[in-house]
Image (tube, coloured by chain):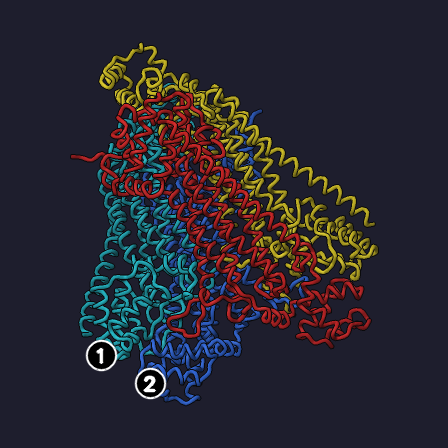
Chain colours: A red, B yellow, C cyan, D blue
Amino acid sequence: MSERFSRVYVDRVLDPSYRNWKRLYCADAMDVHKAHLVMLRERGIVPPAVSEAIKRGIDAIEASCRWPDSIPDGAEDLYCVFEEKLELAAGAENAAWLHTARSRNDMDTTVFRLALRRALRGFLEELAACCTVCMERARAGVGELTVLFTHGQPANASTMAHYLSGFLLELLEGADALIQAMDSVDRCTLGACAITGTGFPIDRGRTAQLLGFRAPVPNTYQAISTSHWLIRPASAMRLLLSDAARLAADLLHKSSCEVGLVDFPDDLVQSSSIMPQKRNPVVLEHIRIQAGLAAGVCVSIEDLFRSVPFQDVNEVADAPVTDLLDAIATAGSCFALVAETVRKLRSNAARAREIAVAFGVTTTELADTMVRECGIGFRAAHRICSAFARSGGDKAKLRAAFLESTGADLAWTDSRIDECLDPGRFIAVRRTAGGPAPEGMESVFAAAEAGLSRLRAALDEMRERNARAARELATAWKGLA
Amino acid sequence: MSERFSRVYVDRVLDPSYRNWKRLYCADAMDVHKAHLVMLRERGIVPPAVSEAIKRGIDAIEASCRWPDSIPDGAEDLYCVFEEKLELAAGAENAAWLHTARSRNDMDTTVFRLALRRALRGFLEELAACCTVCMERARAGVGELTVLFTHGQPANASTMAHYLSGFLLELLEGADALIQAMDSVDRCTLGACAITGTGFPIDRGRTAQLLGFRAPVPNTYQAISTSHWLIRPASAMRLLLSDAARLAADLLHKSSCEVGLVDFPDDLVQSSSIMPQKRNPVVLEHIRIQAGLAAGVCVSIEDLFRSVPFQDVNEVADAPVTDLLDAIATAGSCFALVAETVRKLRSNAARAREIAVAFGVTTTELADTMVRECGIGFRAAHRICSAFARSGGDKAKLRAAFLESTGADLAWTDSRIDECLDPGRFIAVRRTAGGPAPEGMESVFAAAEAGLSRLRAALDEMRERNARAARELATAWKGLA
Amino acid sequence: MSERFSRVYVDRVLDPSYRNWKRLYCADAMDVHKAHLVMLRERGIVPPAVSEAIKRGIDAIEASCRWPDSIPDGAEDLYCVFEEKLELAAGAENAAWLHTARSRNDMDTTVFRLALRRALRGFLEELAACCTVCMERARAGVGELTVLFTHGQPANASTMAHYLSGFLLELLEGADALIQAMDSVDRCTLGACAITGTGFPIDRGRTAQLLGFRAPVPNTYQAISTSHWLIRPASAMRLLLSDAARLAADLLHKSSCEVGLVDFPDDLVQSSSIMPQKRNPVVLEHIRIQAGLAAGVCVSIEDLFRSVPFQDVNEVADAPVTDLLDAIATAGSCFALVAETVRKLRSNAARAREIAVAFGVTTTELADTMVRECGIGFRAAHRICSAFARSGGDKAKLRAAFLESTGADLAWTDSRIDECLDPGRFIAVRRTAGGPAPEGMESVFAAAEAGLSRLRAALDEMRERNARAARELATAWKGLA
Amino acid sequence: MSERFSRVYVDRVLDPSYRNWKRLYCADAMDVHKAHLVMLRERGIVPPAVSEAIKRGIDAIEASCRWPDSIPDGAEDLYCVFEEKLELAAGAENAAWLHTARSRNDMDTTVFRLALRRALRGFLEELAACCTVCMERARAGVGELTVLFTHGQPANASTMAHYLSGFLLELLEGADALIQAMDSVDRCTLGACAITGTGFPIDRGRTAQLLGFRAPVPNTYQAISTSHWLIRPASAMRLLLSDAARLAADLLHKSSCEVGLVDFPDDLVQSSSIMPQKRNPVVLEHIRIQAGLAAGVCVSIEDLFRSVPFQDVNEVADAPVTDLLDAIATAGSCFALVAETVRKLRSNAARAREIAVAFGVTTTELADTMVRECGIGFRAAHRICSAFARSGGDKAKLRAAFLESTGADLAWTDSRIDECLDPGRFIAVRRTAGGPAPEGMESVFAAAEAGLSRLRAALDEMRERNARAARELATAWKGLA
């Protein structure tokens, strides 16, 4: 006997999709059924006896259900299988009412949004944990001398606090962007039905509320056609992942043998099977790779909608959503590695001092002090100090250059010169808002604390809204019997 | 005599960069010099005589300057050329003071942010104009019958208002995202100097204010290393461009000869040089292409920072910024085409009615009405109406299916059946919030008006803040003499 | 007691990697051990007794091995676990010899190349099957009238053979590109050791041969650092996937209700849960989506190497390779769907004729015939026929336009005009090489057959080379005892 | 009076396109007109008097033509303007014949392929020059000691020859891929007309030959619809650009102050305006950036065809092609910088020796020699030498570990141990094919020379074929008078 669907189609499309649903979306679908039925009953669209029968049917299915391993012949999706079970459990007459005033279009995308929202919330928790680690490590690094680089070359003396809080502020800005993106995710499509809503007197706000959404999507056609709930969080995650990979690239340089400004304990370092001397901090590479792979999926999701008609299309179905969920998990893993890396990284102040001296990274400050104290312009001071730097730090050359340029002797003792070149002083005078001196860091820490508070408050709001909705749905559901 | 720089390096890097600066960034650089000097003077860092001399020098350069066509030998960039000019105009002693407490790092990225901010504001203006056109066209289409599709097949009767406002709400959501992204653009990096700020008692807030920025970037290392001011607007633009291309793809279908739901006046249609009968609405393809090319640059900018160390790098310099400015111009062009397309598209209600009947797109409503009026469940009604649809609209088949399924006769006259199938009634009953009936569209238009107001308010705020800053800078500048 | 590695690192990096190895790379690793040991013995690097002991150890492991579910504490990877097992099975003294003259670097990338080669060969088989279907369907469509489109508008009458063979030739060109890309995959890295080879007198050609590779990678540093074996096949697959998605987009248009040039049997069509009339050929969307997702991974792999130092890096390790293997599987699925779609698509000649007439797609030929038979230039004929087309096919208008333009009467009877407009004749005269007339199709089919033969020959060569190597390795392995 | 086209459409589409044509495609279009006319005449399709008139008209246009600055009102493109000029120059009657048996579809894509072919050939010349520099620099570096890295850590002693030839082989493999991709570019679409060819007895092979193409595209529908001629070279360029950026990333590390294995002369180094000590080899960053931006366009071109129907579409028109031409120019610039960088990079053997000793990069060889000479297994030797490495090179520790592990004394003198650790010996013994010893490098240089010969031969073939065609076209053209 011929089958309903082509074998190839079943093997390549329907069955993989069914397995995705079974693994990832089943529980959320049950919540959607419940919220929809509660609303239908409250609005008088479904008679009490029917809603009670359906409620008992769904309860029975939840209590005992074992879904087939693979999609049964003739079924299009897991929902077909569910419908059959419900007909058995509640009677075909009653079961038929559940799909009143809805379509798989609005039902499915609501389910996917629930799953995506949970995954993103989980990711934001992981990110908040990482930010907390960065904050603690940055606070601990206020007096920790390091050297910072531009274009790969040692540039300025600074502190680990200054460096890590700069990264932290980037993460927090990324977190803000992701929270803003949640606004496109955390909206309910139920009631849009196929695309134009329905003639039944439904209440879209009520189902949205019972499922803990911020609000329904305003326009029913938009609700079914929009890609924003996938693209916006994907873009926001990419930004965060890009920052993670950039930190890893920078730390790879700082932790290389020859630079040695930071290193890691043995439990983050791998060896070589053939080179006995190797200590590879490959955790940094794995941050880069996980960031790259997760970001790759994010781009993929964004590109998927390229030139796809502004209609309901299967790009908003389980295959892409599942890939995005996987990418969110990878991104979470990436930030767990970032947190572990930041928590455990040890800086080497002695080496920082060594590099600072060897490559003259504080010469800038010598020039600046010259401007402030010797009454000469910045360019002149810069030229005098360049000559000094090129000489490898020969004070006689400095004095000669000063004399040549200004016609006067440099009025500083050698120890005054050394003081001007001292990395500690270099940092201490950089009280500019946002600079490494403790005074400069005040506004930085304030900004970071504010960002972290925003992130935590957003998480609290989501968590509470969702918990409240879950309670309300449970109560209303119980009330159907 | 040997040159300072390799010929290849000059030809491939320095000179192209110099030309970019000359063409695009010169005027903004002057504002940055002015704001910096005003602040230096206000903070007492530069003596009055010096600031006055520099002011006159800069005024003279602005009044008469002709920059060389290509970069002069030995110069690294346009700033070097400017410095030389200033030395001539203000005296070397005086000129030297201007670069006190800054670096090319903070100076350049401030200049780029000014240019980018202006371009994005211009794009937002173009987007707002497009949204206004969509709003007007949507309002005009409240009673304009059309057919909407899912998966490329006719699905529901609806209105042009419903369709176009769905698209409009997407654009407005994208506009919100871009305005949020401006938060990473519209921040000043001045005072970060190389990366750690300076020992001079500068006021970063003051320069930020004089240049009309929202605020300085909090951490000075972050200020120089961050990619967010490039990536965030690029991502937000991609979202908008994706929507434009999706609309174009959908309209290509709707305007194809065979579908014929919309068409365009002759002034948007091209012919064939060989096929006399052709009328190609290739404006839609050009929307798709311009969206694709502009989006391509946006991705390119995002990818450029892949695994690039979290440091000051030349990825935040003129080559990528210039590409992004070009992409913003292309994106603006794309939305001008979208506006023109939406403004001029004509819908064909007669053809919509024809398709609605031919492909039974209102059968859903027949089933729904059966549920509401005949007291049967949704699934049963759906099955009955499926049989009717398969018969090609044979009412006898409908009655037979009803009888078979329910054991009762369908109590409707033929004209009642026709009424249930009428596209006008289909729309009229869809009063769900967000549906096509006038009642459903109320909340849609309200949401769209709110979005449009947010967009206009954001533009007003930017425009006013920048105008205010320009006035303040001009006054302060005059005060230096 | 403290563990060797950080718990986070184990959970997020080592264990997922171990599970990848266990699932996908274990068997290939065994082959690599065998080939390496055979070579070491043949070159006299390992004493006979040792190689015999190792052989027996590996045989025992293969016969009975159960790998732990997750990575054991302290192990870096599956190879560590294998080494421990081998020490138990062959004695630590003996086991130690196996890793002579190699590193995990060359060992791992050889294993990955084996796995990738097999997956790509499998994909090429699937592609060849799809091409065969396209060839058969194209051959069957030589007389099957259809309409072809440009810019979404009906353009020319043609045949299904012409259309499908155009697509087929694209696939075959893509297959050529993928086979060329195999040249970067099908090369052995063994003997490169860490990156500089070894002082032991190994024979790199011999291990390459025993594992069925074309040759070793020439330079040992290159062998370990290159990304080409991942990027090149990824790029080639993208091209193929792009073509698949483009075909799907075109067929979506052709199979839409309103166009109706092709349709699909019920076993490839899904219905709607709410719209009784819907027949959605969503298989086309799934081709587009699977193509998009697989292509997304391909881009991701290409981008992963962005700005990653030209060194041995973990981007050539299991995480990216595994993602690429998954993408190859998705791409295979996509082409199975393409094959099924092409095999089952039915064209509608009556509808083609209808569209041809309604939209005047043969008017071009009327103009051309006018040029050939009436001695007027192409532009004039085009103008005359444009007037005819605009009139909706009014022959009087045609005659009037001819008279006006040429000053002479058109010497054709009405039935001659009809003949000139006949789609069948339109096709029959298009004998240009590559055109739809049977004469034109000869060179097309010849080119397609040649391409298909190249593809099959390449597959045969790979299959045979690999089978021969497997036999040779088995024999040599047995010889060690 | 109303204009033919919408002002917005003219400003945003027609005029920019016209300017592209004027700037980039005009001369190639003339060649296409000539080749087409010659063929029409040879095939007797156009009468001698007509072809002579057209020839003189085109000659006159070429001799004196000044195209308007912007597109004239009513014109669709530059071809319309050309047609008008030709009507004036040759008489409308005659001019009309030129467009016989062609369409803008086949004409335009042939023009674009000519422009793209020339740009790619130019790029390949630049690439060949870069490869030649790499070959020379590699040859010069056979005895030049360096240290090579894995995962960012010093791994093995080696030579500049080994390192640079590894990179060179990558480039040559990329060049092979690009030459293969030319197969999709270097094919003529003329004669495909709109998409189905023509009823005129044209000779597609002849026009292909006169324009120096390898052959016509086989199927006329494919000819107009294919994206391969854009995507394939874009993909191949990406691979090359990826390698360039990876080399830059690696050299950034090697040239950092702290590593110091390579450095650059002053004419490739920029300074800081604020940090007197800075020497930034930013040429490496510019390689990375130019590679990134050019690669970005390449991806953009590939993505542009995403889900675009397999039809003639404007994605194969001037806007994308122009972007690709720009990207090819940027890619050429990038490889000019790579060549300059490789040519001028200086390695520091003393520093290499220092790093080799400090980080024990030759310890591997100590272990290997132990295996070969002391009759112990590899693992044991590795463990012994690990202990030695951890001790910081304490020979007593080495002896103790040997004794503990083997029960015997290590029979080597201290100077023998030093010899085993000597970087020079480390290299000398690595005679493995592909390793750094002169014997190992033989096959490497042979492979590189073979690749370079292939590249040069391919360039010669293209150059000669095109020159021959140009001569043949000129002669045939003259013959028309």
Cα–Cα span, label 2 and label 1: 21 Å
Q: Which disc, if any, is residue C49?
A: 1
Amino acid type, callout 1? Ala
**Does A380 sit left or right of C444 as displayed?**
right
Pointers 2 and 1 within a single chain? no
Q: Residues within 10 Å of mark 1 (few under 14, many from 20)?
A: few
Q: In this rendering, does residue B384 appear at all?
A: yes
Q: Is residue D430 left or right of residue C58?
A: right
Q: Callout 1: residue from which chain? A: C
Residue C358 in the image: x percent, y percent?
35, 24
Closer to the camera in the image, B104 or B328: B104
Q: Which residue is mark 2?
A: D407
Tally of numbered discs: 2
- Give the SS element for disc 1: helix
Residue C77 in the image: state x and y as whole percent: 35, 64
Pointer 2 chain: D
Q: Point out the frontmost of discs 2 and 1.
A: 2
Q: Position of residue B294 (x, y in %)?
A: 51, 43
Locate the N terminus of chain A by quadrant.
top left
Q: Residues within 10 Å of mark 2 (few under 14, many from 20)?
A: few
Where is residue A82 shown, x and y percent of the image?
29, 34
Circles 2 and 1: CB atoms closer than 8 Å: no
Residue ID at (26%, 26%)? A91
Q: Is residue D45 visible?
A: no
Q: Residue at x 72, y 58 (%)?
A: B101
What quarter of the picture does the C terminus of chain A occupy?
Answer: top left
